[in-house]
Amino acid sequence: YNRELQHAEKMEMISELAASVAHEVRNPLQVTRGFIQLQGENKSEKEKRYLNLAIQELDRASDIITDFLTFAKPQMESIAPISLDKELKHIVGILSPLASINNGTLVMEVRTGLTIMGNSAKFKQAIINMVKNSIEALEEKGEVRLHAYAKNDEIYLHIKDTGVGMEAEEIEKLGQPYYSNKTKGTGLGLMVTYRIIQSMKGSLTFSSVKGEGTEAILRFPTADNYDQVEMPKEYE
Ligand code: ADP
Ligand code: MG
């Protein structure tokens, strides 16, 4: 019996709890939203304004759950080999409609057989938060490209968009909780992403040109090499 095990058990409990809370809370939020919308019919302008505010607040709660717990399932968290092209295909499937709404296209250039270690649900959450940012950064027409390959015992994943881009000062703030430039942003997406990537012994760097676009480069140990790579201190 040692302290570290205790800590791991606690983390496990917390993430299980968070996952069930997400599931339990999402439904009542949706139902309440529906009823409020109905209330809005034949109401005065002032009343409509209040009801709209209520809906916006409900949507905000939903967005926070989305940034944290899209794929959380109330079950044990397991680390296993992840097939990169399979996970990315799933993500492209989920986000293609959002890309279309923003006049963008998602392009995937990923060959089969690239395998990394991690928890599939967590990994999807991390990448979804990034691809969503890329889509939301697009203006008029644009493209988000996912490109992955293996090099020197590492798997590289590039997420490149032709969106608004960022200044160096903005890049420095990425991952800080509540840092957001969006009117409806949570500022939590990339914080979650960074934590997940680190826990997979991976790294994430951004480069960007204002007005031209942004490229994120993720690096992970290959599944074969995973055990040889040290875990960042705070995750031991
Ligand atoms: P949110 O999306 O809720 O604002 P995030 O943590 O996901 O929070 O992102 C924080 C901020 O980083 C965004 O508000 C945006 O200004 C900036 N950002 C992240 N990714 C990109 C990108 N691909 N292009 C331009 N800006 C980005
Ligand atoms: Mg975001």
Image: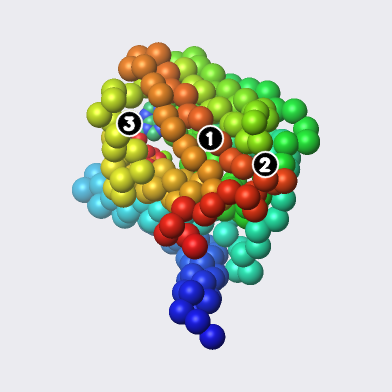
Sooner in the amino-acid sequence: mark 1 or mark 3: 3
Relative to residue 110, is residue 69 drawn left or right? left
The reply to whether discs 1 and 3 touch (Cβ–Cβ < 8 Å) is no
Whether the residue under disc 1 has CB within 8 Å of ligand 1: no
Q: Which residue is mark 1?
A: 218
- Which residue is depicted at the point 63% across and 69% down? 76
User: Which residue is identified by label 3?
Assistant: 171
The residue beneath circle 2 is: 222
Disc count in the image?
Answer: 3
Q: Is residue 2 above or below residue 224?
A: below
- State the residue in front, 195 or 14: 195
Q: Which quarter of the picture shows residue 100?
A: top right
Q: Position of residue 45 (x, y in %)?
A: 24, 44
What is the distance, in whole Å, between disc 2 and disc 3 at their CAs? Answer: 27 Å
Classify 122 as above or below 138: below
| Local SS, label 3 | helix
Along the horizontal axis of the image, is 146 left or right of 3?
right
Mark 1 residue element: strand
Name the residue rendered at 72%, 46% in the picture.
Answer: 224
In this view, the mark in front (2 or 3): 2
Which structural element holds mark 2?
A: loop
For badge 3, the amino acid type reads Ile
Asked whether the residues under the numbered discs 1 and 2 touch, taking CB atoms below 8 Å apart as contact, a structural biologist would say no
